[in-house]
Each structure stands twice: as C-alpha cells, then as structure tokens.
Amino acid sequence: MAGSTYKIIELVGTSDQSWEEATQTAIATASESLKDLRIAEVTKLDVTIENGKVTAFRTRLNVSFKYVK
C-alpha cells in the first residue's frame, strides 16, 4: 500500500466583513494556482482596529495539498 505526501503552507486571508470571508478569500486565491488542496487549519484570527472600530478581519491558515513529483 503506497502512502501519500502532503506539503503544508501558511496563508493569510483578509476581509472587511468576517473571518469566514477572509478564509474563503485565502482558499479561493490559493486554489487558482495550487492543485488538490486538502485540509486547512485556522491557526490565528485577528482584526485591524481604526478609531475604535474593527475595519478588517485576518485569518491565518495552514493549508495542505498533495505533493506530486
């Protein structure tokens, strides 16, 4: 039985609406150039604050995809 190998990269997605949208943005952008995305693990959530208001959401993700020689 042959095993598989996966590469893990870190992505940061941003949105002015939500962390969920920031996540979708990162995955959608990465999927344009990376094949066979498998798993995404949210490692950090943060926001940008200006004048006492949240103005942007950021999601940091570890994303895996199948490594092919």
Image (cartoon, rainbow, N blue to C red):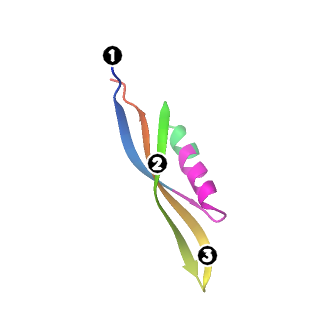
At horizontal 61% and vertical 75% (from top left) the residue drawn is 54
Label 2 SS: strand
Work out which quarter of the rendered image holds the N terminus and state it.
Answer: top left
Label 1 SS: loop
- Mark 3 highlights which residue? 54
At horizontal 49% and vertical 35% (from top left) the residue drawn is 37
Kindly identify the amino acid type of the residue bearing the numbered disc 2.
Glu
Q: Pinpoint residue 59: horizontal percent, then vertical percent.
A: 51, 58
- Mark 2 highlights which residue? 41
Asked if the residues shown at circle 2 and circle 1 are in contact, with their CB atoms under 8 angstroms apart, the answer is no
Question: Residue 20 — which label?
Answer: none
Residue 6: name its quadrant.
Answer: top left
Asked if the residues shown at circle 2 and circle 3 are in contact, with their CB atoms under 8 angstroms apart, the answer is no
**Does 62 appear in magenta?**
no
Disc nearer the start of the sequence (2/1): 1
Mark 2 is surrounded, within 10 Å at the Cα level, by few (under 14), some (14 to 19) or many (20 or more) other residues, namely few
Work out which quarter of the rendered image holds the C terminus and state it.
Answer: top left
Q: Pinpoint residue 51: horizontal percent, then vertical percent.
A: 60, 86
Q: Pinpoint residue 8: horizontal percent, then vertical percent.
A: 37, 42
Q: Nearer the viewer, residue 34 or 7?
A: 7
Main secondary structure type of the part rendered in magenta? helix
Mark 1 is surrounded, within 10 Å at the Cα level, by few (under 14), some (14 to 19) or many (20 or more) other residues, namely few
How far apart marks 2 and 3 lie (CA) works out to 24 Å
Question: Residue 2 — which label?
Answer: 1
How far apart marks 1 and 3 lie (CA) works out to 48 Å
Magenta span of residues: 13-27
